[in-house]
Image (spheres, rainbow, N blue to C red):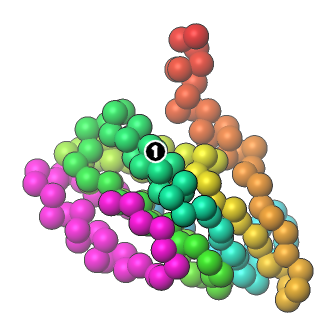
Amino acid sequence: MICVQSEDFNLQVEYDKLRQQSNVGAVVTFSGLVRDCNLGKSVCALTLEHYPGMTEKALTEIVEQAKQRWDILACTVIHRVGKLALQDQIVFVGIASLHRQEAFACCEFMMDYLKTKAPFWKKECIKPGESYWVDARESDHQALFKWTEHLNNAE
């Protein structure tokens, strides 16, 4: 399931849906929150923007890549958009699989791709009336590289 929404989500409900899969042996979830600081700057709010249709297509492609790499039973990606307050949930990624290794790897892969490849634009408010757009960090790109390194070495 892929969902881009402004509304909050319920972790327990999403976890329970993943547990209902046949033969599930592991469920791994990640939930990202709005922090009160980033790169040494205080943050008072976060605004996320996206292009409807384009974003869902990109998320579908990421999920399909994950399914080609790992034998997963189910995958849920929920990403919020709009203005979010401190400690609001931003993203949920949940993976159900037969084994924990596949679920952990798949969840990490999904988050690394979401941080660098998904078409979301983040604006952090550092005080009322003052904000800036956030770029992916070098560490995010390095995290993504580990998933593409074998592809780069094959060329």
Q: Quadrant of residue 15?
A: bottom left
Determine whether 104 is above or below 83 in the image.
above
Residue drawn at 61 percent across, 41 percent down: 143
Q: Residue reaching furthest bottom?
A: 128
Residue drawn at 62 percent across, 54 percent down: 119
Q: Residue reaching furthest top?
A: 155
Q: Is residue 9 magenta?
A: yes
Can you give x and y, in whole percent of width and height, for residue 62 in the image? 46, 44
- Is any atom of residue 74 visible in this view? yes
Can you give x and y, in whole percent of width and height, for residue 120 in the image? 63, 60
Q: Quadrant of residue 154?
A: top right
Can you give x and y, in whole percent of width and height, for residue 118 in the image? 58, 52
Q: Is residue 103 left or right of residue 126?
A: left
Q: Is residue 48 magenta?
A: no
Indicate the amino acid at tag 1: Ile
Highlighted magenta segment, given as a residue range: 1-29
